């Protein structure tokens, strides 16, 4: 019984260490960083309405836009992003 308990503790410790190591290695890709930087630049320039949010950015740089009140502000964001995303 005592050996089983020690193995269980060892297994839990190993799993915890693997999860901790794996999660700390997750970073944005350069494409994701460019999208977030462009979005921030568009916001700083006042070209993005508070109505428009980028909710998700794929590793490839593809992003999802969410609006809260119809599509108000979306065309402005879509126009600004390529200008700032260089």
Image (tube, rainbow, N blue to C red):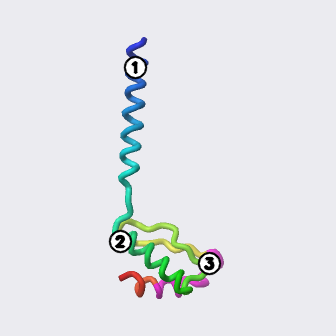
Q: Secondary structure at mark 1?
A: helix
Does the magenta run of residues contain 65? Answer: no
In this picture, is 74 found above or below 21? below
According to the image, label 2 marks what residue? Answer: 31
CA neighbours of label 1 inside 10 A, class few (<14), some (14 to 19), many (20+): few
According to the image, label 1 marks what residue? Answer: 6
Q: Which quarter shows the C terminus?
A: bottom left
Residue at 42 percent of width and 37 percent of height: 16
Task: Say which quarter of the image contains residue 1.
Answer: top left
Which one is earlier in the sequence, the residue at label 1 or at label 3?
A: 1
- Which residue, as the protein is rendered here, is positioned at the far right? 69
**Disc 1/disc 2 C-alpha distance (Å):** 45 Å
According to the image, label 3 marks what residue? Answer: 51
Residue 73: x and y in percent read 58, 84
Which one is earlier in the sequence, the residue at label 2 or at label 3?
A: 2
Residue at 40 percent of width and 19 percent of height: 6
């Amino acid at each position: 019984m005592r050996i089983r308990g020690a193995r269980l503790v060892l297994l839990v410790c190993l799993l915890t260490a693997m999860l901790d190591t794996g999660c700390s290695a997750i970073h944005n890709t350069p494409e994701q960083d460019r999208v977030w930087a462009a979005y921030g630049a568009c916001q700083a320039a006042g070209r993005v309405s508070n109505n428009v949010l980028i909710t998700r950015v794929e590793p490839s740089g593809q992003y999802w836009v969410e609006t809260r009140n119809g599509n108000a502000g979306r065309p402005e964001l879509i126009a600004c992003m390529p200008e700032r995303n260089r």
